[in-house]
Amino acid sequence: MFNPFKKISLLSLLAIGAITANAQKTTPLFDGKTLNGWKKVAGTAPYVVEDNMIVGTMMKGTPNSFLITEKEYGDFILELDVKLEGADSNTGVQTRSHYDPNGNKGKGLVFGRQMEIDPTKRAWTGGIYDEARRLWLYPLELNPTAKTAYKQEEFNHFRIECIGNEMKTWVNGIPVAYVIDTLDKSGVIGLQVHSIGDNSTNEGKKVYFKNINIQTENLKSKPFPKDFYLVNLTANELSKPELANGYKLLFDGKTNNGWVGAYKSVFPAKGWVINDGLLSVLPSDGGESTNGGDIVTKEQFSAFDLSFEFKLTEGANSGVKYFVTLSENNKGSAIGLEYQVLDDEKHPDAKLGKDGNRTLASLYDLMTADKKLGSKRGIGVWNRGRVVVYPDNRVEHYLNGIKVLEYVRGSEAFKTLVAGSKYKDWQNFGQAKQGHILLQDHGDKVSFRSIKIKKL
């Protein structure tokens, strides 16, 4: 017997299936036979087509070589499989990138965000690097559990989302990196053969790319874990994921709300200025708290995840202190554990203390920051600082996403460091249950922005 409702139901299911298929439609960027739609730029490493794969070969004496799309892309989801030969080699996938034929002394220069493929012991595969521009945006020091996602000498599956101002990466289905950026609404996609310099060990080794597919319409982002640490490069703004994760701004970009002078009840009348979204301490005589003086948060914190951006002027000195109790009533800068903010090259304090423990990102006068793996930036550009204090008193310092030191407050090792420092006479230094966050006036111009905190 004819049942019209069953027919309608079947047609509806077919329609839904068609809509779903259209929503997930992907387009191959590689036809499996030719390099049509691509062009080789910058270095001279060769790219050929073999067995439905694009194969790049490493060679000595050439800078980074790229195979880039002739077309530019804005919002997209890109998926591909990559196999890299060698345990100390490197490659990557460029997204929304650009090519300057006159760059690198006329050899050509590709720049822009890259998803890293890194088989070395560092294991930063899936991290986000800004090729030939801002360097590391999301190293895997920020997500160390994802370091095991990559499989050596095998095809690995990668997913890259560039939707709006967000870039996310996955390696073999594992979420790896998440950056919210202010640059590059569109650009080319590129495949890299990394320079090997004069390293004959990697001469002739290959990188294989296959199943390169892109989706540009009806995009739906895959969710990341709620508590995932992301890098938001939008000044003085919190994203929806950050708000949901419990972050709040300590500086709103416009006012001094939430801040007062150290040992004062109001914000300093001079020595600090808020302009163009920056909170800046003004230069005076290079002395400690001799102009406007330090400023501190009204609120106190115990366990927390604190992020901030800072920009140094030449020869400048400042610092970000935490667990500042203001109980000492001392002269000069208020007492607390300090994330050092310093021009290591031009300020004399870098050569004082012990073994560099007064240099940039160090725990001032106590522990030296291990500024490795490209963590340091130049003077006059923005650096990203981070201090994480866990409920069990473990503390970590980061510089531009890279962990540069860790210690445990109140441990015997910590007490030994304090006993040999300028803080030896302060009882229970650095062991308070809670304290203020402090920005230091050391008489030099330093600017801060994007100061945000999450209680742990």
Image: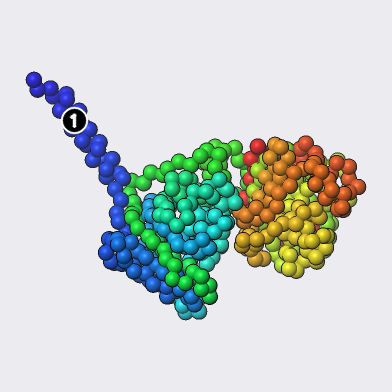
| Outermost bottom residue | 106
Outermost residue, left direction? Answer: 1
* Kind of residue at disc 1: Leu
Examine the rendering and report whether any part of residue 379 can be seen.
yes
Q: Quadrant of residue 74?
A: bottom left
State the quadrant of the N terminus. Answer: top left
Q: Looking at the image, which residue is at 27% across and 43% down?
A: 21
Of 137 and 366, nearer the camera is: 366
Where residue 187 appears, as percent x and y from the top left, is 41, 62
| Other-residue count near label 1 (Cα within 10 Å), few / some / many at <14 / 14–19 / ≥20 | few
Q: Residue at x 18, y 30 (%)?
A: 10
> Residue 55 occupies which quadrant of the picture?
bottom left
Side (left or right) of 423 relative to 396: right
Q: Nearer the viewer, residue 387 or 250?
A: 387
Residue 178 seen in the current view: no
Q: Residue at x 75, y 44 (%)?
A: 408
Q: Is residue 110 above or below residue 18?
A: below
State the residue in front, 304 or 268: 304
Between residue 69 and residue 184, name the one nearer to us: 69
Q: Residue at x 52, y 41 (%)?
A: 241
In the image, residue 117 lies at what x, y percent?
48, 58
* For residue 315, above or below residue 301: below
Colouring of the image: rainbow
The answer to which image quadrant residue 39 occupies is bottom left
Residue 28 image point, x, y percent: 30, 56
Give the percent coordinates (x, y) of residue 309. 64, 54
The quadrant of the image that shows the C terminus is top right
Q: Which residue is mark 1?
A: 10
